[in-house]
Amino acid sequence: MSENILDRFKFDQESSEVDSTKKVKVGIIGTGWIAEAHAGCYKRCPDVEIVAVADIVPGKAEEFVKRKKLPETVRIYSSDRELIDNEPDIDAVSVCTYNRQHAPCTIYALEHGVNVLLEKPMCVTIEEAVDICRAEKKSGKILSIGFQPRCDENMKMVKKIVQSGELGQVYYIQTGGGRRKGIPTPFGTSFIEDETAGIGALADIGCYSLDMVLNAIGYPKPLTVTGYTSNFFGTNPATYPKHPEYAEKFGVDDFGAGFIRLEGGVILDFRIAWDMHLDTPGDTIIMGTKASMRIPSTECWNGSIGGPLKIYHDVAGEPVVTEIPMKHNEVENFDKKIRSFVDAVKYNGEAPVPSAEILYNQAIIDGIVRSAKEGKEITIEIPEI
Ligand SMILES: NC(=O)c1ccc[n+]([C@@H]2O[C@H](COP(=O)([O-])OP(=O)(O)OC[C@H]3O[C@@H](n4cnc5c(N)ncnc54)[C@H](O)[C@@H]3O)[C@@H](O)[C@H]2O)c1
């Protein structure tokens, strides 16, 4: 995986001349919170036509179409399958369902020859991730996973520094993040119930911090994991003053940690929290034989960077610190994520965020859950795709 994934995000506002003679026909599956962002970004692409939307909650997709001011011609369906079965000419779908529905919706779309932009996390279990990758391979279609922080200029800088060799050989990484109070329940309980979410903080925001560092070092294969998960905050009614009943529904983790051995001898020390009595569980650090990098954490971890990167190295035998000024993003990361996917579909390009990489991300999350249950270190085994 030495290929530079960042080079795949070629979109830049000034030079982009979008050819809108041929429209890419897209559908949106799941019309909840994140579908709003997908619809908004697609609407800003002059070469995209949103032709259909689907949601299993009666009336929800209709309301979505009105709220997002989508054309009246948009066809509305009551499930992902109904949409796929009735839209033989559709080019692509955004899968914006809660986590438990990621695998079935993605596999069904791929099996019917439809390209997929799948929201993060990829899915819930490693078995699902393998099934998704196999369906993608068989279909020959494009599957990209929705990690918009990959498009961030500062995140690209993290990878650029690591790949330049400036740090020497990377041997130890600490990553993760968290929120002091941030169990996501603004629109109900789909993030916290087992039957909808399947995994909690580990997958929701943990997948971003794993992607930040794994992408930087070229996504080596994970070998073993020692994991821990807990749910002290999610199951406490005091966490939800307006909805104490949510505590009963809480069926996932609100904190997870893992110690992971990666191919090539790199150690990854990871922790993530939706809620904790602490401001941050620590900055991300990447330690190398020539230099180390500190990536400041943020208050509300969602895959962004909290301040200038710091490089600790020696100059003429003296220890010094070099600060890398923050870069400005000319275009919103979410717009870049959508644009890069649309371009891949339109020009039959490669997936901007390939499933083969996120398979390893999912394997670590799955490994932490399994190791926590078994109470011991486990070996990660990923079958051939
Ligand atoms: N990239 C980001 O920044 C970002 C931000 C928020 C959420 N997300 C991800 O997006 C996903 C959805 O999050 P959300 O907050 O929008 O959840 P949500 O619960 O608000 O919306 C999900 C919707 O999917 C619908 N749905 C479920 N199964 C379906 C099916 N088979 N066919 C049609 N509709 C179906 C539900 O009825 C619901 O309306 C999650 O996996 C989450 O991790 C990503």
Image: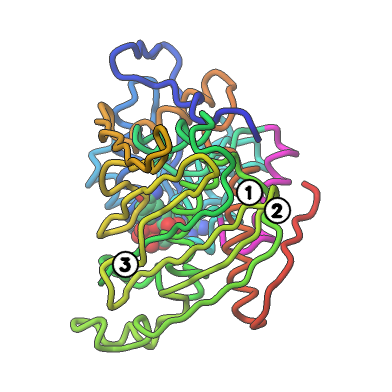
Tag 1 secondary structure: helix
Here the colouring is rainbow
Q: Which residues are magenta?
A: 123-140
Q: Image check: 161 left or right of 137? A: left
Q: Residue at x 76, y 60 (%)?
A: 381
Locate residue 384 relative to residue 73 in the image: left or right. right
Q: To which residue does mark 1 refer?
A: 108
Residue under circle 2?
130
Point out residue 77 in the picture as x, y percentages from the top left corner.
Answer: 45, 50
Q: Marks 1 and 3, Cα distance to the nearest angstrom?
A: 28 Å
Residue 279 spot, x, y in % from top left: 26, 68
Q: Which residue is mark 3?
A: 184
The N terminus, quarter of image? top right
Q: Nearer the viewer, residue 52 or 328?
A: 328
385 shown above or below 19: below
- Choose the circle earlier in sequence order: 2 or 3: 2
User: In terms of depth relative to the viewer, which is nearer, 58 or 130?
Assistant: 130
Whether residue 299 sits left or right of residue 383 in the image: it is left
